[in-house]
Amino acid sequence: MSAPLVLVINAGSSSLKYQLLEPDSGEVTADGLIERIGEPVSVITHEQGGSETVEELSLPDHGAAIAKALELFAAKGTDLAQVDLCAVGHRVVHGGRSLYEPTLIDQHVIDEIERVSPLAPLHNPPNLVGIEAAQALFPDVPQVAVFDTGFFHGLPDKSALYAIDREVSEKYALRRYGFHGTSHDYVSHRAAEFLGRDYASTNQIVAHLGNGASMSAIRDGRPVDTTMGLTPLEGLVMGTRCGDIDPGLLLHLNRVVGLSVDEIDHLLNKQSGLKGLCGENDFRSVTQMIEAGNADAKTAYDIYIHRLRRYFGAYLVELGRTDIISFTAGVGENAAGVRADSLAGLEGFGIAIDPERNAVRGHEPRVISTDDSRTTVLVVPTNEELAIARQAKALVAS
Ligand code: ADP
């Protein structure tokens, strides 16, 4: 008999990613990405059994999107109603203060995810739509929520609290929650395992550099700091998000420039970061523009690297002793230049990248530092779907 599978669903505002996999072996039966849900033409890309199907069609909502995915599963010979599905695992971005462990979804949990939605207005509502659509399609399968904020739940007050009036922050739950937790959790554990080190006595820095980007500092296996805050807008320069800015700039944009709150939201979330600086948010395009001599793209790159180095500096000092630095996600796993530039000239701090090792490409964890580098620098491919599937399976088995 084959081992039970988990269907992982990651529903974004206009997209939905899914993966059907076996949590122990990590073997993927199928995965897919549906984009532009709700627009006149949506696109579904479904990969199963070594072949890829791409279809353009109208998918008005997430329910229709999931139903279409089921149709493609069936067309490839997999009837999801018949497979041994032990859970559906949902990535949920914000769990607020009360939801941080992987959680079996019931009405109370749905209400709580909805209650904290103002803290993640772009993410939690589509996550809920994905949950409700999956509940309707798989009424007898346990649905499990895994929270992006969960890993950072125990951040110490000194890094979690904003230096604002305490009454206000307590009343409105304004604190630094941190995001990408599933990835930081997975990558830091994988890094320790790969090097044969005891997680609970290892100090690590993880740089998750994708479209969204964040860093974390982990002391003796516990996260002590991260770059994202109340929302995923704080910290590093990202594809379209600004990362750290002077909060006075928001006031200025409103009072002097005359932008509304929604316009400022759009500017900082969608029209900033690499895109705001040079017109492109995709790192590969930025790299091509630099190679073609585009000065704005070079400045965007320099700002991106400068911000990364600022946080490396902060976390190296915060940890005192850093055993492992890991790079992950689209940029972290693929852009050797970013890895080299963000840690260049730190030999005095015990960090030295080996250029040949750094140039190696691959899908497995690998060391890119020299043998005498005091801190071991790694590339560790992230796998949030696998992490969610394992957590969902562990919960329903317990
Ligand atoms: P997300 O999951 O946040 O959408 P990813 O982790 O998939 O993001 O990362 C997407 C980013 O990775 C994009 O900016 C993309 O350009 C970049 N990326 C992917 N492959 C490469 C590559 N070979 N070289 C440089 N950047 C890359």
Image (cartoon, rainbow, N blue to C red):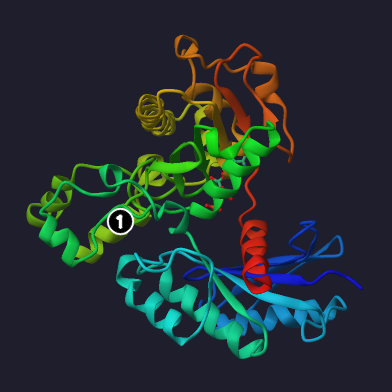
Image quarter where the N terminus lies is bottom right
Q: Is residue 392 above or below residue 207?
A: below
Residue 325 position, x and y percent, is: 54, 30
Q: Is residue 218 above or below residue 138?
A: above
Q: At x 55% / y 29%, what residue is drawn? A: 324
- Give the side of residue 201 with respect to residue 157, left or right: right
Image quarter where the C terminus lies is bottom right
Residue at the farthest left position: 255
Q: Nearer the viewer, residue 231 or 150?
A: 150
Q: At x 83% / y 69%, what residue is drawn? A: 3
Q: Residues within 10 Å of mark 1 (few under 14, many from 20)?
A: many
Write down the quadrant of residue 167 in the picture. bottom left
Q: State the SS at label 1.
A: loop
Write down the quadrant of residue 142 in the picture. bottom right
Identity of the amino acid at label 1? Leu
Quarter of image, ligand 1: top right
Residue 262 position, x and y percent, is: 24, 66
Q: Which residue is mark 1?
A: 230
Residue 25 position, x and y percent, is: 80, 56
- Residue 61 appears in view: no
Q: Nearer the viewer, residue 34 or 137?
A: 137
- Residue 114 appears in view: yes
Write down the quadrant of residue 231 in the picture. bottom left
Q: At x 70% / y 77%, what residue is drawn? A: 69
Q: Is residue 15 above or below residue 379?
A: below
Q: Looking at the image, how many numbered discs can be counted on the residues?
A: 1
Residue 250 position, x and y percent, is: 17, 51
- Give the side of residue 76 with respect to residue 187, left or right: right
